[in-house]
Every structure is written in structure tokens, then in C-alpha cells.
Image: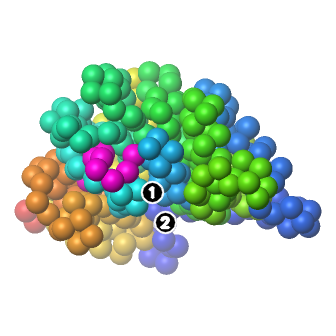
Amino acid sequence: MAGAETVPVARPVIGEAEIAAAVRVLRSGSVVQGPEVAAFEREFSELVDGRACVAVNSGTSALYLSLLALGIGPGDEVVVPSFSFAATANAVRLVGAEPVFADIEADSFCLDPEAAAAAVGPRTAALLPVHLYGHPAAMDRLLPLAARHGLAVVEDACQAHAATLHGRPVGSFGAAGCFSFYPTKNMHALEGGMVVVQDARLAAKLRMLRNQGMAERYRHELVGANLRMTDVSAAVGRVQLAALAGWTERRRQHAKALDARLRGVPTPPVAVGAGHVYHQYTVRVAEQRARFQGELAQRGIGSAVHYAVPIHRQPAYAGGGEELPQTDRAAAEVLSLPVHPGLTEGELDRVATAVDAVAALLGSEL
């Protein structure tokens, strides 16, 4: 549509309510890990079946502290998917353990339980599945695998706020579940993260680790770090959390509309029992993806590739080695389309029309 504004693949919300919450905290003078953080932790707990919540300064910190609190470190291995944001594996390396990369399921883009089972060895201490794009990983098959081998399970739910599997919320399956509140996530806190756990002792340990190892002021029980959440972030997060259910429903409605409209590309499958929250609406473009993306841009439709280079092929992880065919295929084909709750009906129509037009154009040239 000539002259029309580009439809972005993400549209973070920072509205008047978020601004007012931030200003209120700034005027209060209590700005770091105070009453707003405590309230945010209590309120977020309702999203994860009442588990204890520990707020931190990022999703990466949530992953790192979870592994650290569980005692995972040098000499240990953690099975992770390579098809994820690098923070998943970075957290493993940061505690001194070694990530062992396993392949994904083609439909969900999440860790394949059979591939994970094949990757378990004598040094394996944990599984770290990722609920990628807002689709829950196969926790009903991964938990029995972990139980058989005595492994901890840490869930990377950084893209999956309010996703469920057979009615159970992600983040409530493993020893720890980790969420991110980066601005492009389904809800944000400007920046921040949350660890959710069932064990009260583990929660207490996490609270000390995020705050220089202190259970009380100037008494250091552990060697910790400063990974605290600010009250400004927590106040924004509380506003966003209150809106999450409505935003999730809009994402699902938009995904349903795209499922019904799109003809030129395969729509994202959803596993039986999975409550997908569509952090991304990700299709596969098997041929000419770069040109497909360029043609969409010419029509005013934003898109993104998450992730063109899997972690095991990144320079920091030796740039290759493992044979992960589904991972490599996904990296070559995935393309995420706008599905965020800020889309108007007109924008959603433009997305569907453009995708089918580009698919028809490129298909005629193959």
C-alpha cells in the first residue's frame, strides 16, 4: 500500500499508565527492590500456580541465577536447544558448566525430547528447554526423562508469559522457570526478569544471590551479585501484568485470523494441549527467504528472522560441530510476521494480503 506506514513486527507499549507508575515510584524515593518489587512478585505468582517469584534485572540473570542456585557449575553439562537466543547457552557457560546442544521438533521449534535423551551423558546435570516463540516445550515428555536421570529442569520461559501445556502454566514444571521483561516481550518492565520456584529454600537462596549474598543488611551468607530489579521496572511490570490476559487473547485472535487467511506459506502448528501465546507468529519460507522479506518490506510489512545462526554455529561456541538438522533447517527458513496486540484490523489485513501476494509472486518464479 503506497504511502502507508510500515506495520512493525513488534510494537512495545509504554503508555500513560506505565509513565504514571514510573513517575509515582521516582517521587516516592524508594526506587530499588522495595515495595513495588515485592508487589510485582506477589502478583506474578498468580500466573504460575502460586510459585514463589524472585524478581531480577533481566531474563539472562534469571537463567544464570537459577543454575547457580541449583549448584550447577564446572564439570557439569546442561542439555539445551541450539535454536534459541544465545542467552540460553550463555547462562550455562557463565556458571562454568558446558551446554550440550540438542535438536528441536520441527513443528514447535522447541527441544526434541528424543534428541535431548540422546544428548544426556554421565556429566549431565540439567535440562534447559525453551518455550520458543510462546509455544510450550514438551514438558510432559521432558520431565520423565529428567526424572529417570536425576536431572534438574530449568525452563526458559522468556518468550512465553501465560503459555500453558494441558492447562498448566509454563514456568511451573521445572525446579525453576525464568521469564524476561524486555520491551519486545509479551509484557515488559522496561527491563527485568523473574525466577519462579516451588522450593522455599531455593527461593531464599535466589533472593540472597541477587543481592550480594545478603539475607539481612550487611550480613553476607553467600557470594552474590547485584542483579536486583528496580522499583521503577516493577511498577511498569505491574501495569503490564494487569493487561497481559487481554493482550494474550488479542495475539491469539490475530494468529487465528492469519491461520485462516494465509495460503502461500504454512501456518505455525500448535501441539495438542498447548496454549500458545504467540510471542512470534513464525512461518517457514523454504525458498528465497531474504527476497521474501524484502518484498514484504516494499509492501510496508515488517518481519524478522529469529534466529538465522543457531547458537552452536556462533563463534563463541566454536561455530559448528554438532549435526542438528531440524535446527539448521529452521534457521534457514523461519520468518516471523506481525501478530502483536497493537495491530489494527486494517494492519492485519495488510499483513495477510502482502504475504500471500509475495508467496504467489515468488512461487511463479520457481
Q: CB of mark 2 within 8 Å of CB of mark 1?
A: yes
In the image, residue 116 lies at what x, y percent? 22, 37
Query: For the point 27% across and 61% down, which residue is it?
Result: 311
Residue 335: name its quadrant. bottom left
Which image quarter is the C terminus in?
bottom left
Residue 246 visible? The answer is no
Query: For the point 50% across and 24% down, which residue is it?
Result: 168
* Residue 295 against residue 94 in the figure, above or below: below
- The secondary element bearing badge 2 is classed as loop
In the image, residue 310 lies at what x, y percent? 24, 60
* Residue 1 against residue 281 in the figure, above or below: below
Check the image and tell me how it is coloured.
Answer: rainbow
Q: Answer with left or right where residue 344 lies relative to residue 143.
A: right
Instruction: Identify residue for label 1.
Output: 338
Residue 50 visible? The answer is yes
* Residue 325 against residue 126 in the figure, above or below: below
Q: Answer with left or right where residue 16 lies relative to residue 14.
A: right
Residue 76 in the magenta stretch? The answer is yes
Residue found farthest to the bottom: 3
Q: Answer with left or right where residue 323 lies relative to residue 65.
A: left
Which image quarter is the N terminus in?
bottom left
The answer to which of marks 2 and 1 sits earlier in the sequence is 2
Using the image as rendered, state which of residue 166 and residue 264 is in the foreground.
Answer: 166
Residue 90 in the magenta stretch? The answer is no
Residues drawn in magenta: 72-82
The amino acid pointed to by label 1 is Pro
Spatial CA distance of label 2 from label 1 is 6 Å
Instruction: Identify residue for label 2.
Output: 8
In the image, residue 127 lies at what x, y percent? 33, 39
